[in-house]
Amino acid sequence: IVLCVYLIGKTLFSRRAGLWSALFVTLSMGVVNLAHFATTEIPSMFWFTLACLMSACALKRRALRWYLLAGFCAGLSAAVKYVGGLSLLPLIIAHALAGERRPWRWLACGVARSGVGFVLGNPVVLFAFPEFLEGFVKEGAYNTARGEGRLSRAFIPLIAHRLVQALGLPLALFSLVGLAY
């Protein structure tokens, strides 16, 4: 994860930005804590970060392979934890930000490749689809009910709390200011 973050920073900005970013991830108590307890967040975060790196390469280099790799890694991230599917957003944003005209079929191929990664990482989709669907619906219903039907009341504070918990207050504020910038 640290190496991927370094390469993202180096690809998008400079070597210095990559080193600072990698340092912040290395010192992040949330990442250290999750890695220490060997939770599923770490493999999901690895595939998520790798998908973001491939998306950065898709932005900077004109080649279909980066779209395919980004989509595949996003699918593997979603196979570990469904929220990993959000790693398709950097690919979509990279495609939209590409200064030169790139074929929309490249983006479609990358998104389709995410399906391949998801099925490869979660083959129960092929062999026991009804059970997979039942578990997916039950989990969605549970997470929705947790906030008593009010998504903003349950979701936004959860994200803010987790961000501060994972990064610590100073680094969380620094990250939010950087995001706003």
Image (tube, grey):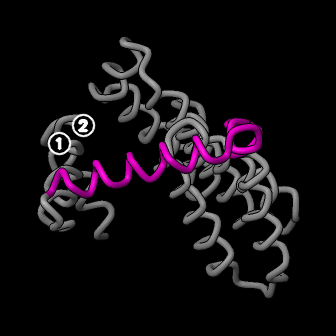
Which residue is at the front of the view, 9 or 58? 58
What amino acid does circle 1 point to?
Val
- Percent x, y of residue 46: 56, 34
Magenta span includes 135: yes
Name the residue: 44% across, 15% down.
38
Quickly name the residue at label 1.
Answer: 164
Q: Single out the residue that lies furthest toward the bottom.
A: 101
Magenta span includes 141: yes
Which of the 4 image quadrants contains residue 90? bottom right
> Badges 2 and 1: C-beta atoms under 8 Å apart?
yes
- Name the image quarter holding the N terminus: top right
Q: Which residues are magenta?
A: 118-147
Which residue is at the front of the view, 6 or 39? 39
Name the residue: 48% across, 43% down.
135
Is 70 above or below relative to 164?
below
SS for dot 2: helix
Quickly name the residue at label 2.
Answer: 167
Which residue is at the front of the view, 67 or 119? 119
Tell me if 155 is positioned left or right of 78 in this view: left
- Percent x, y of residue 145: 21, 55
What amino acid does circle 2 point to?
Leu
Name the residue: 64% across, 65% down.
91
Q: Main secondary structure of the magenta part?
A: helix
